[in-house]
Image: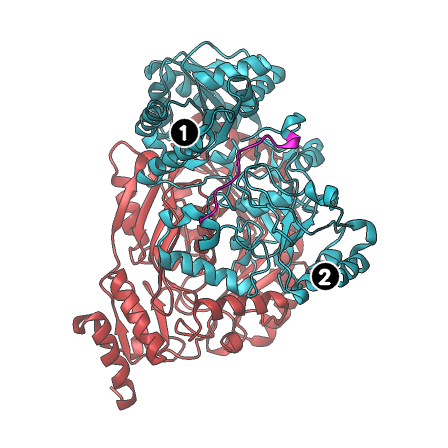
Amino acid sequence: MDPDVIARLRAAVGAGAVLTEPAAVRAYECDGLTGHRAVPAAVVLPLTTEETAAAVRILHGAGIPYVARGSGTGLSGGAVAISDGVVICLARMRSVLAVDIANERVTVQPGVTNLAVSEAVAGHGYFYAPDPSSGAVCSIGGNVAENSGGAHCLKYGFTLHHVCGVTMVCPGGEVVRLGGAVADPPGYDLLGVVVGSEGTLGIVTEVILRLVPRPPACITTLAAFDSMEAAGAAVSAIVAEGILPAAVEMMDRLTIEAAEAAVNAGYPDCEALLLVEIDGPEAECRTVLAAVDRICREAGGSGARVATTAAERALLWKGRRAAFAAMGRVSPDYYVQDGVIPRTRLGPVLRGIRELELEFGLRVGNVFHAGDGNLHPLVCYDGNVPGQSERALELAGRILDLCLAEGGSITGEHGVGLDKACHMPRMFSADALAVMARVRDAFDPEGLCNPGKLLPTPRLCGEVPGPYRAHPIETAGLAERL
Amino acid sequence: MSTAAAPARTLLERAAGEDAVREGTAADAVGGLVPAAVVSPVDEAAVAAVCSAAHRAGLALVVRGAGTRQGWGRTPRRCDAVLDTSRLRGVVEHAPGDLVCTVRAGTPLDELREVLAAAPGHRQWLPLDPPQPGAQTVGGLVATAAAGPLRVRYGTARDLVIGARFVLGDGTVGHSGGRVVKNVAGYDVTRLLVGSLGTLAVITEVTVRLHPLPPASRSLLLERASPARLAALSDLLRTAPVVLSAADVCWPDATARLRVDGTEEAVDEQAAALAGLTGARVLDGAEAEALDAALAVRPWRGEGAVAGLAVPRTRLAELLELASAYAVEMVVRAPLGVAEARLPERPEVVAQLRAAVERLGGHLVLHRGGPGLAGVALPAGDGPEVALMRALKRSLDPAGVLAPGRALGDEETA
């Protein structure tokens, strides 16, 4: 890279905040989906909106592509660097700027972790609703980029529904404020398209979030079933009765056993289990719990087993959250797929996945957000067996075919990134993709802001990702895949 | 028909078929602009053909659903033809088990409600209660992002629309989102169309997420309350152990209506808690229904200028003082700090009120103006945010086919 550009970046953000040593920049070569890698020429670590804007202006002027990055826990290769480009890492921007309980708002820098937001307001009886499983380490900036979900999105909605406003550095270096603390901002809802744009429309440097009061009551229950189909039928029946739980999670035998071995959650020995959380006014929780208990029995399952203490409740969730990492105990390697189906189609899709297991001779663990049809099949394989890694990827792709055939989506919460850009034409017409490209052009006419992600490009679609490898923060036990 | 208008009508007839086009009349006027023609395309392909023809010929189209909010936004610079969506009608698919419904844009909201209510064995609804209920279309509802009291619990169209099909001003047919509630594939273009006043694309089909119809509902009324007591409500409700569906403070009536939805036991428990906390009276079914009906049209009854205001929820007291000072009829969704207000048609009053609201950290958007308020519709704005909005409009509608000038003013096309 042009030494003059590096010198100007150093002048803008400080010499210590620009990394160029090969060993230092290599740490930024991939995100949580480690099969995709590229080493950047430099990494910039700004502390403020102004520093970020200054860096972007320099790169924009020099025509150098850049990628914004938070904690790097994403699972779609959305934060993979551009070779010879620059990574703008926002992990040092981690201040909670303002807590306004009376107006139910909190303003944070993008590097603040998801969990830290809830922790900052817990004493006031509030929480931040979107709860990706990597909440302890993933950053709010990354959540905004991916429109992150989590188990409780069934009732509370996604990041989109909880971001009121952002400060964003545009690809040309201008700073804009989209949305705001107050409702119904005039003009086009640019914020609505920036959330979930995977860092391709600008770099968000400040975020105003909506806080949600802790519900008066919350009940976590568990029910065991002797088949996934029976558990799926119970989910459909819960929905059909007009019940909207806070979360409905499903696990199959393979993932139950793995989670049990990892954290001893006390899960029953069964083919499938449902983890249901109900919250709201006390009286409503009691009525709904009785209905869920009845529905589960009618579907052939056990009755609802309620976690009675906070510790028990935490343990039930710990098992669920640990499910991905725990797969390491039953398989040397695994690939996490993320697809969505209409929740009424759980049965046929699960049967389809079983058939794929037989066809490919690989095991697939199923753990997912059953309430909203968001599947996370874990395709198990052994990377040391020649050809198995490729076969696992092919199987994972075939699962997306099942999702699309049922009218679903190729991603429910992990994003398109680099990994699924080539799958986009299977879900969107060429014209629909052209419209999205025109949206991107309005924000980033030069195509310097995270190029190659989200929308398919012929060059990238010819590439095959490298073998999947464990991410350093995963190996260190700091995060799990979900 | 004027001779200048003849080519427009001929072009549209060629694109959509002769029986889909009629001459425009004074009744079709948009902000005083009488269109040469009204075109009612029979399907999405015909919409695309119409837009493509307009794009090539340099015609300006203004989309119209039921026409109930044709005055929202600024008056467009031009209106060569009205594109009427009434033939894009009907529910495409209601999947009750998935709590989603796909509907064509020209379908009246009432028709959608009937289809949902008639689904056997399922009690579901689209919890949107915009003002002027009845004939308004689903597409119009999305394009104006109109919402009523229930937005306190269920949000607005922004929160409930999960996918759409649409046609750009040049005839490109796009789609985004999908038919599953959880979905992050691609840009959320649908979100851009919500509240865009028909200036970015013609919405042809919308998929919405539905909610279970709550088995029971209770409303409470607080009457003849002092402004201080009303203002204190916001904080009182924030910490109350209830889940509110609506909380409307009405001025100058000095009343507040609270509503909770849920199971029988839960609504009784919550209504009792609210009555104890606020001193409000629990209404019986008939009273609650009458109040719902009255609130649905406030402050929209008849003619007159109506604006949307928003301030931080903690500034409710100041907002009510403004309502009092400017003799403005106002309904405030207290937990959100959002209000709808009937304004006097005097530009200087609107300007003063806007400045006062902005000093509170909020903003004022005029929804329905009047001849006396031409040109004061939206905040002018020339910041980088507006520049970005203009860039988006240029990118999606470079020829300025769709209601040019309505959303952003005169300079939106370069």
- Mark 2 Cα within 10 Å, few/some/many (few <14, many 20+)? few
Q: Is residue B379 magenta?
A: no
Given residues A193 and B378, the one toward you in this image is: A193
Q: Position of residue B379 (x, y in %)?
A: 58, 69
Image height of B247 relative to A216, above or below: below
Which amino acid lies under the numbered mark 2 shown in the image of this protein? Asp
> In the figure, what tint was chain B given?
red
| Residue range highlighted in magenta | A462-473
The residue pinned by badge 1 equals A243
- Which chain contains the residue that carries disc 2? A
- Specify whether A147 is left or right of A118: left
The picture quadrant where one finds residue A159 is: top right
- Does the stretch in magenta take in A471? yes
Q: Secondary structure at mark 1?
A: loop
Q: Which secondary structure lies at badge 2? A: loop
Q: Amino acid at mark 1?
A: Ile
Looking at the image, tell me whether mark 1 or mark 2 is earlier in sequence order: 2
Q: Which quadrant of the figure contains the N terminus of chain B? A: bottom left
Q: Which chain is cyan?
A: A
Number of residues whose C-alpha sits closer than 10 Å to that of mark 1, classed few (under 14), some (14–19) or many (20 or more): some
Dominant SS type (magenta): loop
Say which of marks 1 and 2 sits in front.
2
Q: Which mark is residue A2?
A: 2
Callout 1–callout 2 Cβ contact below 8 Å: no
Question: Is residue B251 in view?
Answer: no
